[in-house]
Image (spheres, rainbow, N blue to C red):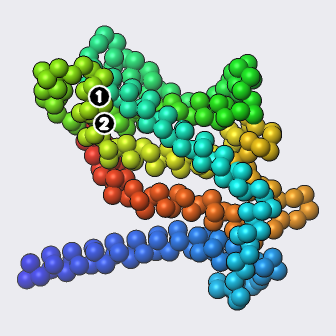
Amino acid sequence: MARRNAAWKRLLAKILLYLVMTILAVCMGVPFLWMLSTSLKTPGETFVYPPVWIPHPPQWSNYADAWQKANFGHYFFNSVFITVTTVAGQLLTSSLAAFSFARLHYKGRDALFLAYLGTMMIPGQVVMIPNFILMRYFGWVNTYQALIVPAIFTAYGTFMLRQFMLSIPTELDEAATIDGCNKLQVYWNVILPLSKAALATLGVFSFIGAWNNFQWPLIVTNDPSMFTLPIGLSSFNSEHASNYSLMMAGTVICVSPILALYCAAQNYFVEGIALSGIKG
């Protein structure tokens, strides 16, 4: 009887868990479905009540119109170039700093790490004005440098990679050193190949942050040739009217690369999240 009651409790707990997860999935999925549905509607169908989820006929031309009207081709190139460069820079700087904090031993290492980690408590809005002043001083306003360089250093990425690298046995470093490797070779040939999961996780986070970044590009650029996709979407808003069908079509274009990247790196993403907090 006790075993039967325990089995029923486990079954009930599993049913409740799946029910809660289903409700959450629906709550998160409905806005995406509405976005996709609206992107295929005419402007007059956008606010029809009750809403029509499957437009008939679907306006596939909205995507071509959105691409041409907002000069999405150039904005897309800017976003891709800035995002790829930012992700590569974050992976390089964060992995080097994490290797230093996790595998090297020198005086003041832990104090320096805590000081660097403390920068995570400073809101980004606080440093925007000083950063803009620096960009203007360097003459980088309306340049790719202003959009990339401030974003390639991240305390969070350093912290996450350090936590992952702490879980790698130190015997591997010693064996590589005995074989004649210097510290840089240990970093490149031993630690990085074993940190693929954490690097992929940081890459996904970095990609999402750089791709969706709106506030900083809006501050340091006023030349349309330097605009990114999030800023380009604002061109569908005017003082007197907004074309929500084209805006949603543009949003689908913006979201698609993020969904594709997450699906491609999902296994690495889950593994990196699971393993990066093993040691503190």
Q: Residues within 10 Å of mark 1 (few under 14, many from 20)?
A: some
Q: Quadrant of residue 185?
A: top left
Q: Give percent across and percent down for residue 160.
A: 37, 38
Q: Quadrant of residue 63?
A: bottom right
How far apart are labels 1 and 2 at the CA level?
6 Å
In this view of the protein, can residue 67 be seen by the observer? Answer: yes
What secondary structure is marked by label 1? helix
**243 versus 179 height, above or below:** below
- Would you say 35 lies left or right of 4 here? right
Label 2: how many Cα within 10 Å (few below 14, some 14–19, many 20+): some
- Mark toward the start of the polypeptide (1 vs 2): 1
Residue wearing tag 2: 192
Is 261 rendered above or below residue 46? Answer: above
Q: Regarding mark 2 in the picture, which secondary structure is present there? A: helix
**Residue 217, image x, y percentages:** 70, 40
> In the rendered picture of this protein, how many numbered marks are placed on residues?
2
**Residue lying at 51% horizontally and 30% vertically, measured from the top left:** 153
Of the numbered discs in the image, which one, if any, rests on residue 187? 1
Extreme residue toward the right, this view: 240
Residue type at tag 1:
Tyr
Q: Are marks 1 and 2 in contact (CB under 8 Å)?
A: yes
